[in-house]
Image (tube, grey):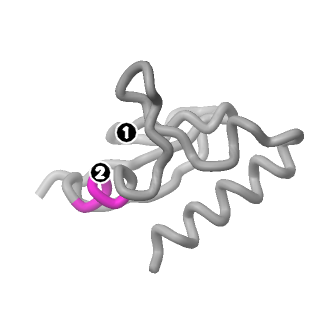
Amino acid sequence: MKHIVAYAWASGLIEFGTVCPNGALPVMVGREKLVRDSIDVLARHSRTNNDLFVPGVPEAASQDEGMSALLRFVKELQR
């Protein structure tokens, strides 16, 4: 089974790949279907395209607030 990593940028944008690129933070690693389905349920969906965002990160007033939102998101994924 193919494994992927979901990762997030400081903007809150979530992307998927085989590795987490420099500058991004890993969100979830595992079987592709499980990772994509889990992220899809909890992420904020863009109204204009297929982009996914970590809830709370795009509107965060600081990087500290953004990191807190990312940590809440990751914790929710682990449930």
* Residue 36, numbered label: 2
Residue that carries the numbered disc 1 in the rendered image: 16
Rendering coords of residue 19 (x, y %)? 41, 41
Asked whether 31 or 64 is in front, the reply is 64
Task: Please tell me which residue is depicted at 16% across the width and 52% down the height of the picture.
Answer: 2
Quadrant location, the C terminus: bottom left
Q: Look at label 2 and name its amino acid.
A: Arg
Left or right for 23, reference 43: right
Vertical position of residue 51 compared to residue 43: above or below = above
Rendering coords of residue 14 (x, y %)? 49, 39
Q: Quadrant of residue 58?
A: top right
Asked whether 55 or 31 is in front, the reply is 55
Q: Which span is picked out in magenta?
A: 34-38
Indicate the secondary structure of the residue bearing disc 2: helix
Query: Neighbour class for label 2 at 10 Å: few (<14), some, many (≥20)?
Result: some
- Magenta stretch containing residue 37, yes or no? yes
Asked whether 22 or 31 is in front, the reply is 31
Rendering coords of residue 77 (x, y %)? 46, 68
Indicate the secondary structure of the residue bearing disc 1: strand
Quadrant location, the N terminus: bottom left
Asked whether 44 or 71 is in front, the reply is 44
Which marked residue is nearer to the observer: mark 1 or mark 2? 2
Q: Earlier in the sequence, mark 1 or mark 2?
A: 1
Q: Residue furthest front?
A: 47
- Tell me whether the residue at label 1 lies in contact with that at label 2, contact meaning CB atoms closer than 8 angstroms: yes
Q: Between marks 1 and 2, how big is the CA–CA gap?
A: 8 Å
Q: Look at label 1 and name its amino acid.
A: Phe
Left or right for 41, reference 54: left
Task: Please tell me which residue is depicted at 65% across the width and 65% down the height of the picture.
Answer: 72
Vertical position of residue 38 compared to residue 5: above or below = below
- Magenta stretch containing residue 47, yes or no? no
Rendering coords of residue 68 (x, y %)? 76, 59
